[in-house]
């Protein structure tokens, strides 16, 4: 599991405490009196943030959608989804129906989008301020509404995956309390949007996004895709209150470091892109404000990212198994049967997979790592403080990003396969089992 309990000793020495800001710190000065919308309005004209905010706005999304590639060219037919992969579609539909019953016509209008291929599904963002209005902002609604939204999440994800997603929300609320900014950062400061008409046969999906948690979920029949995703935490642990002992991303952090330490000196050299994570010690383009060393964040749907680092084919079998273990940790929000399908596909391309590292690899090191193949793209990065005061990366602030290259993101490859199946069924004169009347809810 990627979410584990702290020992009492670790709880007593939670490292983020040394980085708590003073109450008069300018960055948090108006947090206690602002709502998320007001916080955005106050921040959007700050020169240092304007470029970052601009790329997150609807008019600036790159069109047409291509997806992550290594050279700008999509590799077709990588994702051959089985007819039924164990997606919990019926349970998801039941919970969406319960949610929609709670909403007024006006609320439905701002939450529901006609098509799962609408570019609005690509509009998500990690900042704590309210960058992209639209959908249900949970902290503006009643307990019944945000409980209903979480029931949709719970029915979509594996138990450990939902626990992890909920953990991101709880840590966000914990951070809000630490810096007296609970109106801006709380466990319900997230947006929910629904795309397409919910159906047991045709594609539909939803997005859930806010500070340190962004999910894009697409289902079609018994198949589903979750991606892109962003999960993070500042701090990475809760050390007091009812959720004391919650720590996030332990598997990703510890397994990757042990794997790196296990490599031979020659493979360490091949894997390491740079030995420092500090911006001033990285070449141009290797660090950007807000994303830091990440390249797969919001607004980068069509990014060209060549393979870097060491081919996993050079690893021994135990080290390759650790790469697979890391893949499963990054993707553990999938229900078990679906995750088995995703894992098989990843293993089928293990010979085309690369592992890359920036930073040190001793026990106290801070670092960035990436796992990249034709069908997977995962990033882990320790970040500088935003509401904690560390000006350089620290282990208490973690960002993780999960992309699906070659049009896998937003379920586009799955949707294309579905429509191709429909064309083939109609051209052959046979009624495909998946052409059942769409079940719509409003």
Image (cartoon, grey):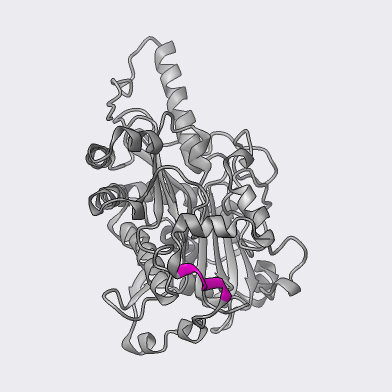
Asked whether the viewer can see residue 218, the reply is no
Task: Specify the quadrant that holds the N terminus.
Answer: bottom left
Q: Is the magenta stretch mostly helix, strand or loop?
A: helix
Q: Which residue is drawn at 55% across and 84% down?
A: 364
Which image quadrant is residue 92 in? top left
Relative to the observer, which residue lies in front, 85 or 358?
358
When the figure is inspected, residue 338 is found, relative to residue 182, above or below; the finding is: above
Residue 277 in percent (x, y) is at 66, 73
Front residue of 217/207: it is 207
Whether 414 is among the magenta residues is no
Horizontal and vertical percent for residue 60? 63, 41
Looking at this rendering, what residue extends furthest in the top direction?
429
Q: In this view, does 413 lie to the left or right of 299?
A: left
User: In this view of the protein, which residue sits in the foreground, 69 or 190?
Assistant: 190
Looking at the image, how many numbered discs can be counted on the residues?
0
- What segment is highlighted magenta in the picture? 26-31
> Is 29 included in the stretch rendered in magenta?
yes
Instruction: Say whether residue 407 is visible.
Output: yes
Location of the C terminus (image quadrant): top left
Residue at position x 52%, y 65% from top? 399
Relative placement, left or right, of 419 versus 89 is: right
Q: Residue furthest right?
A: 284
What residue is rendered at 40% in x and 13% in y?
426
Q: Residue furthest front?
A: 33
Q: In which quarter of the image is residue 423?
A: top left
Q: Position of residue 21 (x, y in %)?
A: 51, 81
Camera-nearest residue between 358 and 32: 32
Residue 16 position within the rendered picture, expressed as x and y whole percent measured from the top left: 47, 81
């Amino acid at each position: 599991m990627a979410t584990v309990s702290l020992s009492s000793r670790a709880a007593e020495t939670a490292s983020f405490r040394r980085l708590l800001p003073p109450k008069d710190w300018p960055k948090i000065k108006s947090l206690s009196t602002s709502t998320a919308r007001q916080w955005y309005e106050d921040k959007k004209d700050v020169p240092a943030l304007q470029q970052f905010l601009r790329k997150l706005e609807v008019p600036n999304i790159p069109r047409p959608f291509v997806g992550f590639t290594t050279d700008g060219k999509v590799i077709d037919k990588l994702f051959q989804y089985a007819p039924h992969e164990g997606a919990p579609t019926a349970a998801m539909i039941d919970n969406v129906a319960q949610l929609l019953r709670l909403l007024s016509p006006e609320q439905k209008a701002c939450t529901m989008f006609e098509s799962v291929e609408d570019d609005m599904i690509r509009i998500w963002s990690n900042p704590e301020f309210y960058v992209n209005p639209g959908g249900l902002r949970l902290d503006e609604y009643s307990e019944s509404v945000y409980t209903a939204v979480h029931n949709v999440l719970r029915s979509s994800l594996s138990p450990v995956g939902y626990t992890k997603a909920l953990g991101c929300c709880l840590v966000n609320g914990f951070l809000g309390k630490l810096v007296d900014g609970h109106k801006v950062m709380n466990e319900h400061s997230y947006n929910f949007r629904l795309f397409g008409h919910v159906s047991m046969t045709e594609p539909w999906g939803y997005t859930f996004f806010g500070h340190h948690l962004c999910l894009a979920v697409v289902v079609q029949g018994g198949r589903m895709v979750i991606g892109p995703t962003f999960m993070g935490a500042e701090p990475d642990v809760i050390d007091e209150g009812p959720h004391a002992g919650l720590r996030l991303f332990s598997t990703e952090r510890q397994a990757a470091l042990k794997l790196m330490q296990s490599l031979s000196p020659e493979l360490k050299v091949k894997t390491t892109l740079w030995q420092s994570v500090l911006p001033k010690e990285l070449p141009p383009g290797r660090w950007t404000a807000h994303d830091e060393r990440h390249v797969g964040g919001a607004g980068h749907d069509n990014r060209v990212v060549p393979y870097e680092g060491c081919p996993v084919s050079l690893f021994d079998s135990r080290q390759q198994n650790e790469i697979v273990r890391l893949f499963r940790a990054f993707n553990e929000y999938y229900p078990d049967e679906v995750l088995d399908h995703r894992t098989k596909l990843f293993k089928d391309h293990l010979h085309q997979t690369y592992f890359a590292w920036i930073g040190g690899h001793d026990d106290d090191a801070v670092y960035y790592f990436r796992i990249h193949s034709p069908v997977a793209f995962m990033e882990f990065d320790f970040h500088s403080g935003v509401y904690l005061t560390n000006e350089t990366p620290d282990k208490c602030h973690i960002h993780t990003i999960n992309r699906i290259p070659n049009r896998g993101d937003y379920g586009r490859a799955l949707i294309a396969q579905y429509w191709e199946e429909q064309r083939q069924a109609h051209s052959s004169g046979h009624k495909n089992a998946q052409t059942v009347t769409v079940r719509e809810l409003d």
